[in-house]
Image: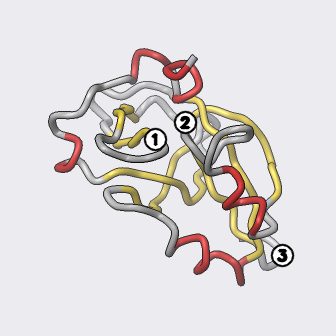
Amino acid sequence: MKNNTIEIAVCGAHMRGLPLNYQLIELDATFVKATQTDKIYRLYEVPEKVPPRPGMVRDTQNGTSLELEVWSMPLENFGAFMIQIAEPLGIGTVVLEDGSSVYGFLCESDPIKDAKEITSYGGWRGYIS
């Protein structure tokens, strides 16, 4: 947290130009940077979500680096953002390629055990294009 803001990593439908980005914009979040995760994550298409979105799961044994964006949001707006997050997604600690960490979207593993793995696309944009 810096200056009463919180940095949030997004890896799917909340990214710039995608269907849920408006949720960040409406809460006065500002784009910080496009980056990659550390090489410890896998990505799945979350079943039955509209709009479609990915679920990122930490896997230190078989993970890879994935594309994401970091946004900065006023701390007082974070609760309003949290109540819009649909299960099985949640907010946890995401490690970036430079070793730093931010809060970001992670997915519970059980609901995606039969989901399509899309890690090989390098990120959500790679998968949907």
How was the colour assigned to the protein in this rendering?
secondary structure
Disc 1: which residue: 53
Give 74 or 50, whichever is nearer the viewer.
50
Give the percent coordinates (x, y) of residue 53: 46, 41
**Residue 2 in which image quadrant:** bottom right
Q: Earlier in the sequence, mark 2 or mark 3?
A: 3
Give 46 or 108, whichever is nearer the viewer.
46
Disc 2: which residue: 37
Q: Earlier in the sequence, mark 1 or mark 3?
A: 3
Q: Secondary structure at mark 3?
A: loop
**Residue 28 in which image quadrant:** bottom right
* Mark 1 vs mark 3: in front: 1
Taking 71 as reference, is 113 left or right? left
Give the percent coordinates (x, y) of residue 63: 36, 28
Mark 3 surroundings: few (<14), some (14-19) or many (≥20) residues within 10 A: few
Q: Name the residue rendered at 69%, 68% in the picture.
A: 6
Mark 1 surroundings: few (<14), some (14-19) or many (≥20) residues within 10 A: many
Q: Name the residue rendered at 38%, 32% in the picture.
A: 43
Q: Secondary structure at mark 1?
A: loop
* Mark 2 vs mark 1: in front: 1
Q: Name the residue rendered at 30%, 37% in the picture.
A: 59
Q: Which mark is residue 3?
A: 3
